[in-house]
Image (cartoon, rainbow, N blue to C red):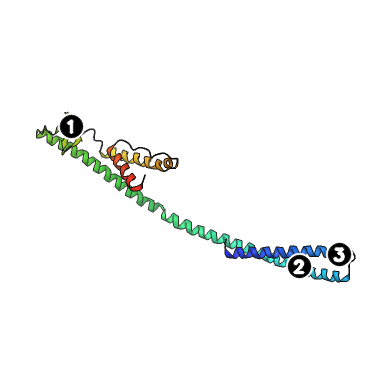
């Protein structure tokens, strides 16, 4: 509430109080006149009538000031609402959303390319190991399905599940999981467990370490 409206309301309350006091006094004087009281009472009543009229005018003026101040406050709030809406909606304009979507598309494309590049690399190195007869590195071989080892790490041409398509599925699953976390925490539950995929496990670990989830 603005200072102008508060002051106008205070003035109105004072004017109403003054008018009510005068009305009460006049009622008492009128009863005395009706009872045949002295001429002095009649003169006082006449004076009070004038004061009551003045008090009524003051009250009407105060009411008008309250009305004007209230209207001005509403107009001020409307202007503030317009400015706030303009500022926030400009920040969230379709062009800004398109920029964010473009960045997301580029990131998704990069993930898919990296995943597909890794799968191609696993298959290419598996073929090289087979061609070179590196049986000590080959842990399993069934047609194109090859499992081999490099520095203690197993690579599987069929079951690594790290190709681009699978990584995109992991991202969506993790996004859904994270969206459920606030609601579960609010109810006193632990966050939902990530899927068993190694990248999903890494993502969950990074989130827990960086955001306290």
- The residue under the point 21% across, 40% down is 118
Q: For the residue labelled by badge 1, is the local secondary structure a helix, a strand or a loop?
A: strand
Classify residue 19 as left or right of residue 176. Answer: right
Residue, disc 1? 146
User: How many numbered circles does the render carry?
Assistant: 3
Residue 165 appears in the rendering: no
Among numbered discs 2 and 3, the one appearing first in the sequence: 3
Q: Which quarter of the picture shows residue 64?
A: bottom right
Q: Nearer the viewer, residue 15 or 56?
A: 15
State the CA–CA distance, disc 2 to disc 3: 20 Å
Q: Nearer the viewer, residue 68 or 206?
A: 206
- The residue under the point 31% across, 43% down is 205
Residue, disc 2? 53
Q: Nearer the viewer, residue 74 or 182?
A: 182
Classify residue 4 as left or right of residue 188. Answer: right
Residue, disc 3? 32
State the CA–CA distance, disc 2 to disc 1: 105 Å
Among numbered discs 1 and 3, the one appearing first in the sequence: 3
Q: For the residue labelled by badge 2, is the local secondary structure a helix, a strand or a loop?
A: helix
């Amino acid at each position: 509430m603005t200072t102008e409206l508060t002051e106008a309301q205070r003035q109105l309350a004072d004017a109403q109080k003054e008018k009510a006091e005068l009305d009460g006094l006049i009622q008492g004087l009128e009863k005395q006149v009706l009872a045949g009281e002295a001429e002095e009472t009649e003169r006082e009543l006449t004076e009070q009538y004038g004061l009551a009229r003045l008090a009524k005018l003051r009250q009407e003026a105060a009411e008008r000031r309250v009305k004007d101040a209230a209207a001005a406050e509403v107009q001020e709030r409307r202007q503030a609402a317009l400015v706030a809406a303009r500022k926030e909606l400009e920040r969230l304009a379709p062009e800004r959303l398109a920029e964010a979507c473009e960045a997301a598309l580029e990131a998704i494309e990069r993930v898919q390319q990296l995943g597909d590049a890794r799968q191609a690399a696993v298959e290419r190195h598996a073929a090289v190991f087979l061609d070179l007869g590196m049986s000590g590195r080959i842990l399993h071989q069934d047609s194109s399905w090859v499992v081999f080892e490099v520095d203690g790490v197993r690579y599987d041409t069929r079951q690594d599940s790290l190709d681009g398509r699978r990584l995109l599925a992991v991202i969506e699953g993790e996004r859904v999981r994270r969206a459920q976390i606030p609601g579960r925490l609010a109810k006193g539950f632990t966050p939902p467990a990530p899927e068993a995929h190694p990248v999903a496990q890494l993502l969950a670990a990074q989130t827990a370490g960086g955001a306290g989830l």
